[in-house]
Amino acid sequence: MFGDLFNKFQEAQQKMNEGKQKLADITVDGDAGDGAVKVSVTGNREVKVISIDSQLLSPERKEELEDLLIIALNRALQNAEKMWEEEMKGLAGNMLGGMF
């Protein structure tokens, strides 16, 4: 009985690791200021790319750039969080279905 439960646990752990790897290979985006600031993050919520329109690079627009960067980062991270939750929910459903 415990051996079977242990095997199921190891299988669940492996599927979680596979899910995390899958998410690391997926990129989601967020933007702000009508695309003036764009951010790409992985499904594991790791920032990969920040793109800033050259119009925002002047000293007098520094505060606007900072605000837009925060908005774009938060949008990209929210998109990644949704994707991560969906992936983990699917894995959990598959694992629990296999345990009972």
Image (cartoon, grey):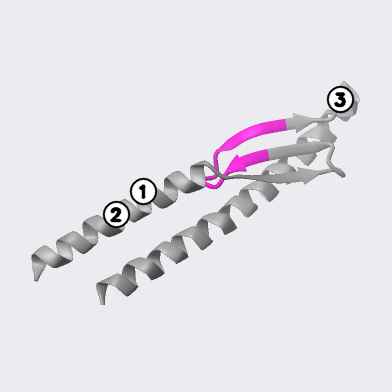
Residue 7, how many percent across, how many down? 18, 60
Disc assigned to residue 29:
none
- Give the position of the C terminus as an image quadrant: bottom left
Q: Which residue is mark 1?
A: 17
Q: Nearer the viewer, residue 39 or 91?
A: 91
Q: Residue at x 30, y 52 (%)?
A: 14
- SS of the residue at dot 3? helix
**Which region shows up in magenta?**
40-50
Of the residues shown, which amino acid type is indicated by label 3?
Ser
Assess whether residue 43 is covered by the magenta stretch. yes
Cβ atoms at labels 1 and 2 below 8 Å apart: yes
Q: Dot 3, crowdedness within 10 Å: few (<14), some or many (≥20)?
A: few
- Displayed quadrant of residue 63: top right
- Relative side of 62 to 9, left or right: right
Q: Which residue is mark 3?
A: 54
Residue 88, how many percent across, how many down? 45, 60
Q: Which residue is mark 2?
A: 13
Judged from this view, the residue extending furthest toward the bottom is: 100
Q: Residue at x 70, y 32 (%)?
A: 50
